[in-house]
Image (cartoon, grey):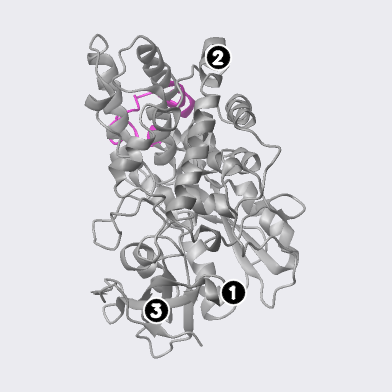
Amino acid sequence: MRKLTSTHLKNRTSVSPLYPGALAQTINALIVPLDYANPSEGSATLALARLRSQSPNRKGTILTNPGGPSGSGVDFVIARAGDLISNVTNGEFDVLSWDPRGVNHSRPAITCGFSTAESFQDFFANTIIQNGIEARGNFTDEDDLVSFFSKVNETDNLIVEMGQKCVEANDFLQFVGTIDYIATEQSLEVTSSIEHIAATLNDAEDTLLGFAETCVQAGPANCSLAQANSTGPEIFSELVTLIDTAYNLTKQGLNNVTSFEIRDFLWGLMADPVLWSSTGVSEIEHSESVLESEANTLVSRSQRRSFSGGGIPPSSNTFIDPSVSPFVAELAINCVDSIDQPDITTQILFETVVNVTQQISPIFGEVLIVQAPIFCHRFPTRAVERFTGPFNHTLAFPILVIGNKADPITPFQNAQNVANSLGESARLIQQDGFGHTSIAMNSDCTQSIIRDYFVSGALPENGVICPTDQALFPPNITVASVNALVV
């Protein structure tokens, strides 16, 4: 049995607001071999966090991790989801998570040789990885395509240099990989960079339309993007026009806000619907104001206001290590988990970004150029403990596979494919909501199914559709209220 030992981490405790008797604490650390097959390679120290059950009916421990890869399990339990999971399961389970190898407070940390966030940004300065793509509409303009593909060689050299920095600075990278797959209708398969990025955006524009529809129902008083007779498609079209306006001004050198920045912001915003009525509307209005009032003012990139971004907002506590860039770890783990791709070139990846933009997501396709899998075909090392299957074992107890109706990052089709692959070993739940993963919006129905699953071992019928109860705009605009209006 592997022992818990003291580590560089300080013990921290905080009182759970939902279960005042429950303590969330960092539990020293777990020492694990870098390579279970060869313990002489050394060890890693995994930071752990646990929300303890104080219930007299305590049933055990739920292990959870936010994924990413590179998400901090310590932060996830202490500052974000520990209380939610405990509440959903009646407080009858400990909730335990960890910072995976190389991530956040676990040691050794993946740094790729960057000591600060600023040095990481400087490495990509004035490249397409930092600046993104300026493209009109669905990326069919010939000048835009010529400009984009002219960056292939520069980007390829940058990708190679980044990979070399990672392996030279962190000689343990081959020991951080775990598992990587893509869901198809028939099976779970290991994935190439092309398959990874091509499977991302199927629901992204449906999520944006959901944002527009809920804004319309909220009305001008509660969503200032709407007018008295607005429709969802009209607001959607206005957002496209906003992107086009930013593109035109950027091409003229009046680049207060670029079209790529707006696309990237909206994509992140779609992942976190609870921010739609606050951060979302205010940032969109800000960009409209900038583009209208400063159209004749040349503003350098360093003078521009940065968008606040989407997704789960950074926590304000001390459980995130500021010296470790999450994107560095995300990039490295994605790539060591990936398969060797001798037939994939950076040119082919550029072509894939164009194809996804033209055929799947004209609004968001360009954001793929700054995602971690872009680096993986040229990454110089792979994980020694990657699990590549088989994924078709019959499980002792079926698992729940839960997907949102419209998830801008992991589309519902992925959840369907995973459930189909597992057959009788899975139960599929569709949550009728938006955002990235089922915790992006509250659903009493989903929570009830999860509670019954853990507390009493009850299984739902396969294919249950759960409504959501999250108010996305005041006074109480939910997905259900929009659905009722449409019908």
Please give the residue where the numbered disc 2 appears in the rendered image: 146
Q: Secondary structure at mark 3?
A: loop
Going by the numbered disc 2, the residue's amino acid type is Val
> Which mark is on residue 38?
1
Among numbered discs 2 and 3, the one appearing first in the sequence:
3
The single residue placed furthest to the right in the displayed view is: 186
**Image-based side of 278 in relation to 66, left or right:** left
Above or below for 339 versus 342: below
Q: Nearer the viewer, mark 3 or mark 1?
A: 1
Going by the numbered disc 3, the residue's amino acid type is Gly
Q: Is residue 436 visible?
A: no
- The residue located at (38%, 20%) in the rendering is 242
Please give the residue where the numbered disc 3 appears in the rendered image: 91
Residue 361's image quarter?
A: top right
Q: Secondary structure at mark 1?
A: loop
202 or 157, which lies in front? 157
Q: Which residues are magenta?
A: 215-238
Among numbered discs 3 and 1, the one appearing first in the sequence:
1
